Image (spheres, rainbow, N blue to C red):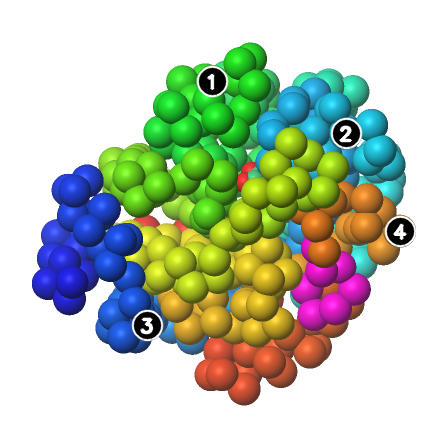
Amino acid sequence: MKELVDKLHETRKLEKKEWVQLIQNRNDKLDEYIFEKARNEREQYYGNQVYIRGLIEFTNYCKNDCYYCGIRRSNKRAERYHLTENQILDCCDIGYELGFRTFVLQGGEDRSYTDETLVHIIESMKTLYPDCAVTLSIGERSHESYRAYFDAGADRYLLRHETANANHYRKLHPEELTLEHRMQCLADLKQIGYQTGCGFMVGSPYQTAETLADDMVFIQNFQPHMVGIGPFIPHHQTPFAEKEGGSVELTLTLLGLIRIMIPNILLPATTALGTLHPRGRERGMAAGANVVMPNLSPVDVRKKYLLYDNKICTGDEAAESLQHLKETMKAIGYEVVTSRGDFICKE
Ligand code: 5AD
């Protein structure tokens, strides 16, 4: 299997069947080989720097009904909230003081935020914090809407593709959501000029080595600026309540492989990874990640933004624990920095 990792390193791509092989044959020894290469690649672009993003979960209303997600519209037991512009700006204020220079506005697909409202929020953020980047993670919208947010100053957009395999996509989402539309959104975002992120859950129900290989091939073709992956964690109030969760190990392997595939990619060690393993984020860094996204949402809403069970929300992942995060990262050789942390282009 080392030959396949070497081939990936040299050519930055593999054939689908090679991905299947690599994924089916992952093991701890091979991981060490992958992680070391991944860390080397990361270092060439980002040194030992860790970028931080202040995550603002501004609404848990959602018009969608994804089978895996705790804030799906059919979950009548989810306690819904959304933040006003002023509440969002208060989060930014706290975050700025803490040293955040990127704010991520993440939420369910909540149509009560019209384009006009969103544009206003983005413009206010960029006026008050001109040295900060704004990342949006608000799902599928039209090309014109994406354009309007970009013109208002939004810099980056995260939209996980969830799975690049159409049959698999069907099993995770109701009929009204299509992979085709998802992919169109991603193409629009990139074309408009956002630093664009896709991604998927590791170990989502019905995922196979084959569908994961489709994900890797999609990523190598799409060439995103960011990729967000984390283990699937069942939520008890969803149709997937009884499904098995994803594995931390496979998530780490895939983080390493993605780093080798796109050496300059922005790659977060996600909250879901931190939820499943107490040292998940550090292990993510050691596997090739270079971004962490501490929670900047108002403390009282964090427990309501529950995409999955047992989400961590009062410990190290919280923005207030930044000092502790810095120390933890320092102990393993990384430096948390205060900068926008943009994608670094290849020469
Ligand atoms: N487990 C892990 N990740 C989840 N997401 C949604 N539900 C879950 C879950 N149960 C992820 C999806 C989505 C992102 C915001 O959170 O990939 O795109």
* Sequence order check, earlier mark of 2 and 4: 2
Decide if residue 139 is in sight here. Answer: yes
Quadrant in the picture for residue 217: top left
Magenta span covers which residues?
311-317
Q: Nearer the viewer, residue 71 or 184?
A: 71
Q: Nearer the viewer, residue 328 or 343?
A: 328
* Sequence order check, earlier mark of 1 and 4: 1
Q: Amino acid at mark 2?
A: Asn
Q: Position of residue 4 (x, y in %)?
A: 14, 58
Q: Is residue 168 left or right of residue 260?
A: right
* Sequence order check, earlier mark of 1 and 2: 2
Query: Gap in Å between the C-alphas at discs 1 and 2?
Result: 21 Å
Q: Which residue is mark 4?
A: 300
Residue 312 shown in magenta: yes
What is the magenta segment's predominant secondary structure?
A: loop
Quadrant in the picture for residue 281: bottom right
